[in-house]
Image (cartoon, helix red, strand yellow):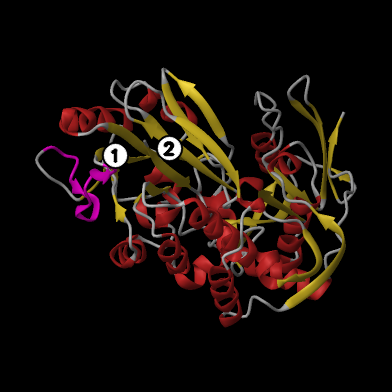
């Protein structure tokens, strides 16, 4: 006999797509059974377009449909502050756990457990006991500043080690729910006593044995569910991958998602696309992409600036934009809050921004972390340097001032070399900007040599 873990994570903008949500729920329900534990590993309430209107509560029908048992939080679950995620936690069916997040102050300087949540839980299946601990990335207070800047996040490795020690022989299996970057995911897998790590946060899939421990990660946007089997005895855990694209459609969840989109005006058709615009990560980060050009064009259009820059880490995967495209589908490309900001920058400052976006040292081949409009950029991947930058056909002048449209994350994050004191104006939400652009200008965006590999 075995105990099965059904693992989803980082649903994010799948909540904006009735078909994807319906198939994700349908896949889990079709394989659930009484011996299974349904587990989530964070970022399942945000980001997304509907998330901005419902503050994470748009995920509740899904949680209830699949009867999630246990979940940990992710950094984006704090996108709207602590109050909305606490309300979701209080109303959803699953038990939420996180062992390394603290708030306030106490004698040990870490504070008290966030929202009074337990760090661990034990679930019983088939006469056996499965222990779970939840941990999130220590960078969360920095990368989710709206609701997490005052939180203290302790070492996930030490938190897991403590949890294993405390539960000890009281459980038959020990599972980590990990919303961590890859190296920390591997580090918690090395903790003695851990049987399985269910991962999240990183948007690529993972299935491997690390230090003798099974580690799986489904990637983002509800495309994969992992089914992990825990065996009684000496057999090691095993994992089966389920593609939700091939799963049955849960009509109830799909219909509810459509109703949510309709209620906030996101089912309106805003453009027709004859040549599908693909949104895959590789297309966005290996150079110029049509989807990146679309968002960069929208920024420059709404702000009427010389140039625009979009951090493409803020773009999200999903089905290609094709045929009759709704406001929700376009907005889901870039489903974040903040504002479109206008700055006056020198040519020297603009070049520094572009150099920060060019990262040829990445082993995965992802060269570019930005998209532009109004500029052409020549770069040499082998030499790892920019060769030239032109603005509207004219070579960039170091001392000249240019108007730049970008988003508030780029302006105020320490990750980008932008002098935020040069901000002169603010516009609306980025995802609304992209939808408005599509509605007014259509989506005929093409490749135009903006990023040139020399």
**x%, y% of residue 215?**
46, 30
Residue 20 position by quadrant: bottom right
Vertical placement of residue 79 versus 10, above or below:
below
Q: Residue reaching furthest top?
A: 211
Query: Which of the labelled discs sits on residue 198, or is there none?
Result: 2
**Which secondary structure lies at badge 2?**
strand
Left or right: 84 with respect to 296?
left
Q: Which class describes the residues within 10 Å of circle 1: few (<14), some (14-19), or many (20+)?
A: many
**Residue positioned 77% across, 19% down in the render:** 383
Residue 398 position by quadrant: top right
**x%, y% of residue 49?**
57, 66
Q: Where, quadrant-wise, is the N terminus in this rendering?
A: top left
Left or right: 240 with respect to 384?
left
Cα separation, mark 2 vs mark 1, equals 10 Å
Q: Can residue 6 be seen in this view?
A: yes
Q: Earlier in the sequence, mark 2 or mark 1?
A: 1
Q: How many labels does the image show?
A: 2
Query: Which of the labelled discs sits on residue 133, or is there none?
Result: 1
Q: Residue reaching furthest front?
A: 1
* Viewer-closest of 352 and 427: 427
Residue 235 position by quadrant: top left
């Amino acid at each position: 006999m075995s105990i099965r873990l059904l693992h989803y994570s980082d649903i994010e903008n799948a909540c904006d797509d009735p078909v994807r949500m319906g198939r994700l729920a349908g896949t889990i329900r079709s394989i659930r059974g009484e011996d299974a534990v349904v587990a989530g590993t964070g970022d399942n309430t945000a980001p997304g377009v509907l998330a901005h209107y419902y503050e994470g509560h748009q995920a509740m029908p899904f949680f209830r449909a699949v009867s999630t048992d246990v979940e940990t939080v992710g950094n984006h679950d704090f996108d709207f502050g602590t109050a909305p995620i606490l309300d979701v936690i209080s109303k959803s069916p699953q038990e939420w756990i996180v062992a390394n997040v603290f708030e306030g102050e106490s004698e040990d300087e870490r504070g008290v457990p966030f929202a009074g949540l337990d760090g661990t839980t034990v679930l019983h299946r088939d006469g056996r006991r499965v222990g779970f601990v939840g941990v999130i990335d220590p960078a969360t207070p920095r990368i989710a500043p709206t609701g997490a800047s005052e939180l203290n996040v302790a070492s996930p490795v030490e938190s897991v080690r403590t949890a294993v020690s405390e539960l000890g022989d009281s459980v038959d299996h020990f599972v980590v729910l990990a919303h961590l970057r890859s190296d920390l995911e591997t580090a918690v897998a090395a903790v003695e006593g851990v049987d399985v790590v269910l991962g999240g946060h990183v948007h690529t899939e993972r299935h491997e044995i690390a230090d003798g421990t099974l580690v799986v990660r489904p990637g983002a946007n509800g495309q994969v569910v992992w089914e992990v089997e825990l065996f009684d005895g000496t057999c090691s855990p095993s994992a089966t991958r389920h593609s939700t694209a091939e799963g049955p459609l849960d009509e109830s969840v799909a219909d509810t998602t459509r109703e949510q989109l309709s209620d906030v005006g996101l089912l309106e058709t805003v453009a027709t696309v004859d040549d599908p615009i693909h949104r895959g990560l590789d297309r966005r980060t290996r150079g110029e992409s049509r989807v990146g050009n679309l968002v960069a064009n929208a920024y420059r259009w709404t702000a009427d600036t010389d140039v625009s820059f979009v951090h493409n880490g803020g773009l999200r995967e999903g089905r290609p934009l094709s045929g009759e495209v709704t406001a929700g589908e376009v907005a889901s490309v870039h489903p974040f809050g903040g504002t479109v900001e206008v700055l006056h920058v020198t040519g020297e400052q603009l070049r520094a921004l572009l150099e920060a976006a060019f990262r040829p040292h990445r082993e995965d081949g992802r060269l570019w972390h930005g998209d532009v409009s109004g500029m052409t950029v020549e770069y040499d991947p082998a030499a790892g340097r920019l060769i030239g930058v032109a603005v509207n056909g004219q070579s960039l002048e170091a001392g000249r001032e240019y108007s730049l449209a970008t988003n508030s994350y780029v302006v105020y994050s320490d990750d980008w070399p932008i002098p935020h004191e040069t901000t002169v104006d603010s516009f609306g939400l980025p995802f609304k900007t992209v939808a408005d652009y599509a509605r007014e200008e259509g989506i005929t965006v093409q490749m135009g040599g903006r990023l040139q590999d020399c």
